[in-house]
Image: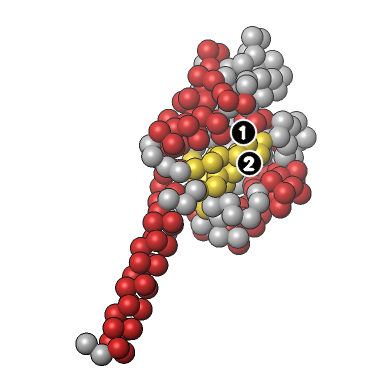
Amino acid sequence: MSLNRIGLRAAQLVAMLAGLLLWGSLAHAQTRIVALGDSEIRGKGVAEADAYPAKLERALKAKGHNVVVTNAGSNGDTTKGVLSRMDSAVPQGTRIVVLSVGGNDIILYGADRATTITNLLAIISRLRARNIEVLVFNLPVAGKHGKPSGDEQTRMRALGALPTTPMQAGLVDDPKLHVEEVWRTGTEWHLNAAGYDRVVQRTLPLVEELIRKP
């Protein structure tokens, strides 16, 4: 075999090994997830280890995913607040954002649903412009939140987001799943650890779907 052919075979072998190492590195790369929003994300009234982001991280790791889930929730936050702090709350390298915000806009500050949804879509648009996958909890469609304005989920999907049911869907009428002893006094109603377990169970397959996306 000529020296040229030996050199070519050696170069091919090196390239193949480099490819395998890169594939292994990507396969085991850590997926960075940011849970972004208001007190429903922050976990008002529970220890940080019992809030949704920490429970989601543990559930994903138990399924074999190499992830870190950052809690970027802020009690009392609004869609405008999230828009103003997105750059610091969602650092470079974030792969997925789980978003829950908008209820305070309407309940605490009297914003109309259409304006709140417009801001929510702006948040999604900015995240998608950074190639970040977005799982977004819908706003409730009854009570103080008002009626949906148009096909909100279709508009979210058109931006590339994955909408899901409101965080408290099916939970809001069960006081055993809430922190406050005097349940739903004014705006004081937040999920406890058991409530967040239900949310994790419901959303875990959706987050896994986003993790598997190329």
Determine if residue 33 is in view.
yes
Q: Residue at x 62, y 30 (%)?
A: 40
Q: Which residue is mark 1?
A: 41
As drawn, 151 above or below 177: below
As drawn, 94 above or below 57: below
Depth order, front residue of 161/69: 69
Kindly state the secondary structure of the residue where label 1 is placed: helix
Q: Residue at x 38, y 39 (%)?
A: 64
Kindly state the secondary structure of the residue where label 2 is placed: strand
Horizontal and vertical percent position of residue 23: 39, 60
Quarter of the image that includes the N terminus: bottom left
Question: Mark 2 touching mark 1, by CB under 8 A?
Answer: yes
Q: Amino acid at mark 2?
A: Leu
How crowded is the residue under tag 2: few (<14 C-alpha within 10 Å), some, or many (20+)? many
Tell me, for residue 36, which label it has, or none. 2
Q: Amino acid at mark 1?
A: Ile
